[in-house]
Amino acid sequence: MIDQLKEKVNGDAALTRRGRFLTTTFLIEVGTVQWLVSIAEGKIASVTQGPFVMPSWSFALRAPQEEWQKFWSANPRPGSNDLMALIKRRVLKAEGDLQVFMANLRYFKESLEKLRPAGATA
């Protein structure tokens, strides 16, 4: 599923414009599976599945697979519909350089919401 992120984000001109000043690599962990997502000027350059020996990333988002499935469902319930709601419920752990994450929060929220089924709303 996460391997579709590049196509979905890069196909949204408004979203890539919003992130035009963002260049970073972050890690997303779904249960025990890790993915490195590299972003260059708002466009996703690569999405690479682990395992990794010594990955280099600016920040990481880690949550159990069940929580990501709820977040990526067609109609997520309150508490599972937003990255900050997941953090508040303490099921999503954000670690590393959180300045990058928080400064571009809307970009990351909208990017990860792209993995919901077509037509889904939060």
Image (cartoon, grey):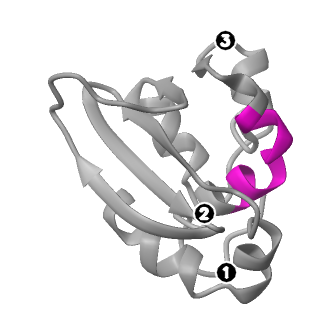
Q: Amino acid at mark 3?
A: Arg
Give the residue at mark 2.
74
Q: Secondary structure beneath disc 3?
A: loop
**Residue picked out by circle 1:** 119
Type of amino acid under label 1: Gly
Of the image marks 2 and 1, the number of the one nearer the N terminus: 2
Residue 38 pos. (x, y %) = 45, 54
Circles 1 and 3, Cβ within 8 Å, touching? The answer is no
Q: Marks 2 and 1: CB-CB under 8 Å?
A: yes
Q: Earlier in the sequence, mark 2 or mark 3?
A: 2
What's drawn in magenta, residue-wise?
100-110
Q: Residues within 10 Å of mark 2 (few under 14, many from 20)?
A: some
* Label whose residue precedes the other's in the sequence (1 or 3): 3
Can residue 94 be seen here? no
When asked about the image quadrant of residue 55, the answer is top left
Give the overall secondary structure of the magenta segment.
helix
Identify the element where label 1 is drawn: loop
Asked if residue 117 is positioned above or below residue 95 in the image, the reply reads below
Seen in the image, is 24 located left or right of residue 53?
A: right
Is residue 16 visible in the rendered image? The answer is yes
**Residue 42 percent across, percent down from the top left:** 65, 68
Q: Quick check: 96 left or right of 36?
A: right
